[in-house]
Image: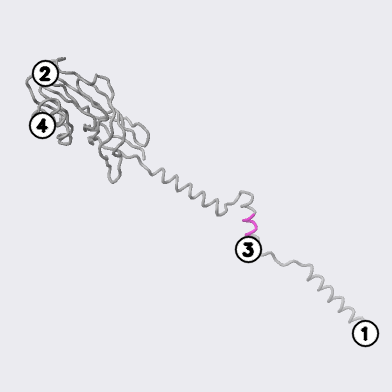
Amino acid sequence: MRSPLALLSLCLYFAFAVTGCTSKPPADSTAQNTAATDTQASNGTGENGSAKEAREHKERAEHKEAKRQPLVVASGTAITVSLGTAIGSKLSKTGDTFTGSVAKDVVVGNTVAIPQGANVSGTITDAKPLGRFAGGASLQVRLDSINIKGADVPVRATAQSFSQKGKGKRTAVLAGGGAALGGIIGALAGGGKGAAIGMAAGAGAGTGGAAFTGNKDIVLPAESDVTFQLSQPLEIRQ
């Protein structure tokens, strides 16, 4: 009696043992999620750390670029130019060009919009020596462009006019600027050499200087300053 029962019990034991060995434990959800993420990243459907950082950096750069606005130099701003060569009512002809450089920084807010030393170009719009028309000599100059960061930026500015009265008049007038002190000092010193001395003495006395003597023509030596006033706002890309 005991032998059949013992045999049956042993068979049941082995049956449970085999079933337990062949059954699989439940899958770990964390491991599955990690594996899925790795698979997506390798297939290009996900986004790993490096890709995300690169994308965010690009977005920040684009946002910063969109926020950058150009500097605007307001109409009426004065731009002082140091002439590169001498010009004058007899030295120059209408239509001639001249070059120079910005004599001092032009600042917008706390930013230098036009740096000192920036190259400029302009045009002689009128040049008449003494004896060519009633009333004396005349010279008119116009600022055309300023080179900023390697690019020529067109400029709209009021032309500067100089005039010298005819015979017997030892006076000098800068249109829109009053008496040219350098010319007066030069006239008092006497002769062409005195005029050059006067120019050096009076170059910084007003909006510009010119060398004048008695019945001589208008001369603006190299490195003398002429100040132009913007007639339209000047937009400068940063």
What element does badge 2 sit on?
Answer: loop
Q: Quadrant of residue 165?
A: top left
> Is residue 84 left or right of 50 when viewed as pictured?
left
Q: Earlier in the sequence, mark 1 or mark 3?
A: 1
Q: Position of residue 208 (x, y in %)?
A: 18, 32
Q: Position of residue 93 (x, y in %)?
A: 24, 19
Observer-side mark, 1 or 2, equals: 2
Question: Whole-Å distance between the Cαs marked 2 and 4?
Answer: 22 Å
| Quadrant holding the N terminus | bottom right
Which of the two residues, 3 or 234, is positioned nearer the viewer here?
A: 234
What residue sits 45% from the left and 46% below the top?
61
> Is residue 227 left or right of 57 when viewed as pictured?
left
Observer-side mark, 2 or 4, equals: 4
Which residue is label 4 attached to? 185
Question: Whole-Å distance between the Cαs marked 3 and 4?
Answer: 93 Å
**Residue type at numbered disc 1:** Met
Q: Position of residue 14 (x, y in %)?
A: 84, 74
Q: Earlier in the sequence, mark 2 or mark 4?
A: 2
Which of the two residues, 188 or 10, is positioned nearer the viewer here?
A: 188
**Residue type at numbered disc 3:** Thr
Q: Earlier in the sequence, mark 3 or mark 4?
A: 3
Which residue is label 2 attached to? 135
The rendered magenta stretch, by its main secondary structure, is classed as: helix
Observer-side mark, 3 or 2, equals: 2
Observer-side mark, 3 or 4, equals: 4
Q: Earlier in the sequence, mark 1 or mark 2?
A: 1
**Residue type at numbered disc 2:** Gly
Query: CB of mark 3 within 8 Å of CB of mark 2?
Result: no
Q: Earlier in the sequence, mark 3 or mark 2?
A: 3
Which of the two residues, 19 or 115, is positioned nearer the viewer here?
A: 115
The residues colored magenta run 33-38
